[in-house]
Image (cartoon, rainbow, N blue to C red):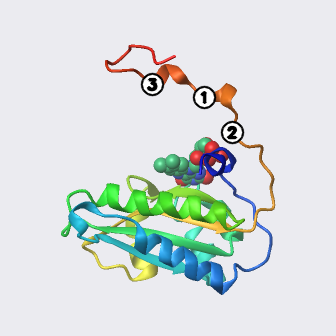
Amino acid sequence: MLELLYKRRSIRRFNDIPVEQEKVDQLVKGVLLAPSSRSLDAQRFIVVDNKELLEKLSVSRNHGSSFLKNAPLAIVFIGDSSLSDVWVEDTVIAATFTQLLVESLGLGSCWVQIRNRTHDENTSSDEYLKKLLSIPEELQVECIIGLGYPEEKKPPHTDEKLKYDRVSLNSYGNKLK
Ligand SMILES: Cc1cc2nc3c(=O)[nH]c(=O)nc-3n(C[C@H](O)[C@H](O)[C@H](O)COP(=O)(O)O)c2cc1C
């Protein structure tokens, strides 16, 4: 697992090949296995493999989402705030599960932040996606994970880059190392 965490990097360029249905099925199992507060299952997901829709997803933000245009697959992570006051945590855990599962399947992925972001000066990214994907008004979009077979190769994280000064032992500021 730790090796997987070192290897995981944000991948924004993908080969022009589809993700096999078997892998898509595993990714769907992965999101459904993510825990939720009080087991309320406040997360909802949309798997997008339609090229035209992916192009439209790529402009959900004024910047930071353009790479989705060339991704063969994306999963949209949605929360239901009427079910849970911690829908953000619930959806983020499912998205994180997805990024790690993606890595373990030999694929690559990158997060697109949607909550608190804008499509243009008059429209939030959440509003834009609700209209595009027929998402009910009372739900909230947290993020999109774009994924596919990596076209770019990035070096894994290294121990030298780990900032141990961010970690304390027993009391804040008490150095661990
Ligand atoms: C909460 C969150 C939001 C992010 N939003 C975006 C985004 O909107 N667009 C994007 O291209 N990358 C986004 N990223 C990816 C980060 O830029 C990336 O994880 C970071 O630079 C570290 O690089 P690494 O993932 O290769 O380790 C996001 C990552 C996180 C955790």
The residue beneath circle 2 is 157
Q: Residue 108: x percent and y percent? A: 68, 61
Counting other residues with Cα less than 10 Å from the Cα at mark 2, is it few (<14), some (14-19), or many (20 or more)? some
User: In the picture shown, does residue 175 fall above or below 166?
Assistant: above
Check disc 3 and give the amino acid type. Val
- Residue closest to the eye, 3 or 123: 3
Is 51 left, or right, of 26 in this rendering?
right
How far is disc 1 from disc 2 in space, using C-alphas? Answer: 8 Å
- Residue closest to the eye, 5 or 79: 5
**Could you tell me which residue is drawn at 33 percent across and 55 percent down?**
89
Is 45 left, or right, of 41 in this rendering?
right
Q: Secondary structure at mark 3?
A: loop
**Could you tell me which residue is drawn at 45 percent across and 59 percent down?**
114
Labelled pair 3, 2 in contact (Cβ < 8 Å): no
Specify which label sits upstream in the sequence, 1 or 2.
Answer: 2
The residue beneath circle 1 is 162
Labelled pair 1, 3 in contact (Cβ < 8 Å): no
Check disc 2 and give the amino acid type. His
Q: Is mark 2 within 8 Å of ligand 1?
A: yes
Counting other residues with Cα less than 10 Å from the Cα at mark 1, is it few (<14), some (14-19), or many (20 or more)? few
